[in-house]
Image (cartoon, rainbow, N blue to C red):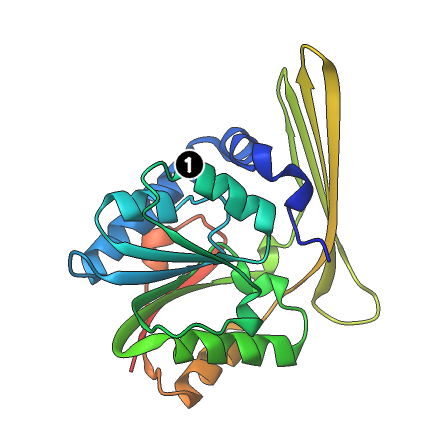
Amino acid sequence: MPSAHDSWAWIYDEVYEKSFGSFYTNLTSQTLSVVDGLLAPGSSILDIGAGTGRLAIPLSERGYSITAIDASKPMLDVLRSKDSASRIHTVHTRLQELELKDQFDFVCCVFSVFCYLTTRSELDAAINAICKHTKPSGKILIDVTALGSFAGVNYQSEDLIRTVIVEEDESEQHLFCYHETVQKYGPDGVQEFKDKFPIKYWDQKLILDRFEDLGFGNQINMSQYFMGSGARYYHLMR
């Protein structure tokens, strides 16, 4: 079954870099800075929802041991194409189905990963998987997207048009349908890509309470480092 972003994974970086501009670059830099401040050199990191390697690539270049997972195989294919030194171990799986033998010093689950989980059972399974794969002394960084961020996006340049429409599903509160159309113009004409999938707003208390139930009750709000991101960030420890 296709996953979100499969059809346009090869232009995903270009679309996000152009449509979000310096904000996208700054968010990445800030996340890397926060991770560096939390970890010892050479720590093992599980990057959940790694996509094309926005964090995994620079983290591996910093000397961390990276395992990157994503539900989209094409996105991971792009990541591997950028990992010229073959430092990163990639795993194609949905978070809620993650089963690895290893535990990690640090688990990173940011950039709206929880939104792709649309049922409570999926959410619970995903949080269980995160905790299961974190060492007893390990740390977790998550973000929880604010309700106000479930909104459309419009961007247009000479060679790219991006349109995102987010519509609430009338059958269930806080369940949305995400529609994305990307038109890329080049010498051979226009290429159009369409993406459609459900997303869900989850209350931060529900997520944090579930982590606490599983032993991660030491919860530090780090949202001040990510102002303007449209999400709340938390550092979790046992």
Residue lying furthest right: 171
Q: Number of numbered discs present?
A: 1
**Quarter of the picture holding the C terminus:** bottom left
Q: Is residue 178 visible?
A: no
Observer-nearest residue: 101 or 29? 101
Does residue 207 sit above or below 194 in this rendering? below
- Under circle 1, the secondary element is helix
Residue lying furthest left: 41
Q: Is residue 116 visible?
A: yes
Does residue 23 sit above or below 88 in this rendering? above
Q: Quadrant of residue 53?
A: top left
**Quarter of the picture holding the N terminus:** bottom right
Residue drawn at x 64%, y 54% as measured from the top left: 150
Observer-nearest residue: 166 or 125? 125
Residue 70, percent from left and from top: 53, 56
Residue drawn at x 62%, y 62% as measured from the top left: 116
97 on left or right of 29? right
Label 1 CA crowd tier, 10 Å (few <14, some 14–19, many 20+)? few
Amino acid type of the residue that numbered disc 1 sits on in the rendered structure:
Lys
Residue 87, percent from left and from top: 32, 47
123 on left or right of 139? right
Residue 165, percent from left and from top: 73, 45
Residue drawn at x 37%, y 60% as measured from the top left: 223
Label 1: which residue?
A: 82
Residue 44, percent from left and from top: 27, 62
Residue drawn at x 69%, y 41% as measured from the top left: 7
Residue lying furthest top: 187
